[in-house]
Every structure is written in structure tokens, then in C-alpha cells.
Amino acid sequence: MAKRSTISSLGNFFRYSDMRLILLSLAASVYGCMLVFSANTHVGSGMRGTLVHIVATAVGMTAALFISQIDHEDICRRWPIWAGVTLLLVLLTLTPLGLGVNGADDKAWLGVSIGSFRITFQPAELMKITFIITFSVHLSRVQKDLHRFGTVLLLGLHALVPVALVFLQGDDGTALVFVMIFLAMMFVAGVNLLYYVIGLTAVLGVFPLLWTFVLADDKKARLLCILPPFVDKYLKTEGWQQYEGLKAIGSGRLTGVGFLQGGRTDTPVSNNDMIYTVACEEFGLLGGILVMLLLLGIILELAHCARHARDTLGSFLCVGMLSMIAFQSIINLGMALRVLPVIGITLPFFSAGGSSVATLYLGIGLALSVAFSQKARRPGTLV
């Protein structure tokens, strides 16, 4: 009887799960692990960094498959627990327990030592997922009142919490990702476009003051170094990373120099922010296009999940994940191609990092849960 039940459960899993999203995510992760291994070999990180990435990917995928079998409504119903734990972890980074790793100037990590082995974790990555959960719950409860200014104001204050905390850590790139997730989810929920016009006008009005009194000289240089009049001026300083990255991309030509044969240019953090340059150098233009196609496939599948979700809560969860992956991908690829400034945003599924890849799969698990609920938990199929 137990054997029959197990077979039935496996059958339901394959019948009702979004196998396209699972396979696309797995393919992106396998490709990403290959790139991280190659990049770590060139930058001298050895096998430790690669093993951390592989283990985090395996743990994350396992967690995603487990989460996919839990009703997303049950997960969201416990939002105070997820939000409370994440908030506590992020607040700890603002204390002396906060760490900066790999030369980063922001204190956004927590660390635990087990003998001679040290594990670091970036709570802001987990906060992306918990924010998508809490904001989805918030939106689903007030969607009928989005025409009211007070409702929109409270939603804005909700988003301001993670943005402010991450900004205090010194992680401007992640703060921008939160803003983009917020804007995308609000747009899909049906917020009046007038609020976007007002917000854009306010940003444009405040920007000169931020440029004059807030932005440090190095951050100004990062913004300027992608503009043709300033390329040569900042080539040997803030523009060096992108210059070397473009050399690596160009050296790959159509089919690349071959796996593990890259590293001929000195691209800083090629295993993380600039992982796309490794794909283009070793696998050429075709390898770079494959990265984009895999990410586009995942984004389109998340859009499909959002469109066919059984409720607005599920739709918002999928839109949150879609926007996070889409905006991080656009910004990261723009950095590598020198059309956007370097602001320290990783490429989903591909950049090295245990925290980012493991928590990314928690979000994929939420989307898989929404898809499974739409097929298997509707009346007449499964209990």
C-alpha cells in the first residue's frame, strides 16, 4: 500500500509540476556551475568556491521541489514568521556582526565558523524572497482599494522598509532590485499610471541634489565611465573592469576559445558580477546567446505561471520572481556589455554565490507551488 502511494505521489508530481520551469532552471544552473568552475580556476579561488556554489545549487533545487508540494497559500499565511526571521538577520548585519567579503565595501553578510571552515550568508538575498511573499499578501488584500492614495502610500512604505535597510548596509545595487520588484508588482496589480509619473518627476527633481551632495566621487565615476566623452578619462580606474570584460567578450568571437581556456584578460570578479564575460570568452557569441535564451525562457515560463495562477496571490508571487530575475539579468548583462554602470548585481543562476543561488531557488519553489496548485489542487483532481 505504501509503495502504491509513493508511486502515485511521484506520478502526480510529474503530471502536475511545471517541468519546463524545472528543466530550464536546472539547465541554467548546470551551465552556471561550469562557468563558475572555470572562472574560479582563473582567479585562483580553487575548488572551495565552486563546491559552495554547487552545494548551494543542489540544496536550493531540493528545497524548491519540496516547496512546490506545499500550497502557496499555506506558505503565505505564515508571512509574519518569514518576515520576522529575515528582518532580524538583516538587522544583525548593521551591528558589529556584519561582515564585508571578497573586497566588498558593504557590510551585508553574516558569518559562522565551524572549525577552520567559515560559512557566510547574505540575508538581503533571503529578504528578496520574503518581500515578494509579504508584498504579494499585501497587494492581494488591498487590490480593490488601489484607487485610494492611502492604500498606495502604505504599499510604498511597505517597500521602503527593505530598501532602506539594504541601503544602510551600503548595498545600493540590491536596494535598486527591491525598487524594481515593487514597481513591477504595483504595475501588474493595476496602480494608476499617474503615480508612476509623479514618482519619476520626483526622482528627476531630486537627482541634481543627490549628484551634488550625496553621491561619492567613485559612484559618479561609475555612472560617467560608460558615456563616450568620459570613457578614456576613467579607463584605468572605474572603467577598467568593463574594459577588460569587453576584451574577454570580444576574444571569444563566434564559438569561443574553449572551456577552461579563458582567463586571458584580467577581468575583476569574473566569477561573480562579470560571469557573462566568461561565457562569451569560452563559448563565444553562441555561449552568450545561450545564457540569454535560458534566462528568457525562465522569465517567460514565470509569466505563464502568473497568467494561469488560480488566484491573484499566486499571480503576484510569480510576477515578483519574474521581475527580480528579469531586472537583475538586464542590469548585470548591461554591466558586462558596458551599456549600464557597474552597481554590483549578480546574474541569476550563473554568478558565484551560495546565498544568492540557494535563495533564488526558494523563489522558484514558490512559483512551482503556484503552478502545481493551479493544476493539482483545483476541485476534481487532488485533495
Image (cartoon, rainbow, N blue to C red):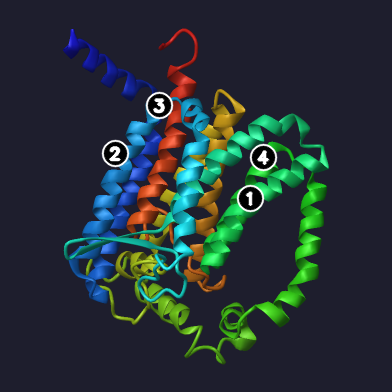
Q: Which residue is mark 4?
A: 188
Q: Secondary structure at mark 1?
A: helix
Q: Residue at x 56, y 66 (%)?
A: 168
Q: Amino acid at mark 3?
A: Ile
Q: Nearer the viewer, mark 3 or mark 1?
A: 1
Q: Earlier in the sequence, mark 4 or mark 1?
A: 1
Q: Which residue is mark 3?
A: 70
Q: Earlier in the sequence, mark 4 or mark 3?
A: 3
Q: Amino acid at mark 1?
A: Ala
Q: Please determine whether, in this image, residue 213 is positioned above or below residue 194.
A: below
Q: Please determine whether, in this image, residue 29 is positioned above or below residue 255.
A: above
Whether residues under marks 1 and 2 lie with C-beta atoms below 8 angstroms apart, the answer is: no
Q: Is residue 108 left or right of residue 164?
A: left
Q: Is residue 92 visible?
A: yes
Q: Earlier in the sequence, mark 1 or mark 2?
A: 2
Q: Residues within 10 Å of mark 4 (few under 14, many from 20)?
A: few
Q: Which residue is mark 2?
A: 62
Q: Report the Cα–Cα distance between label 3 and label 1.
A: 26 Å
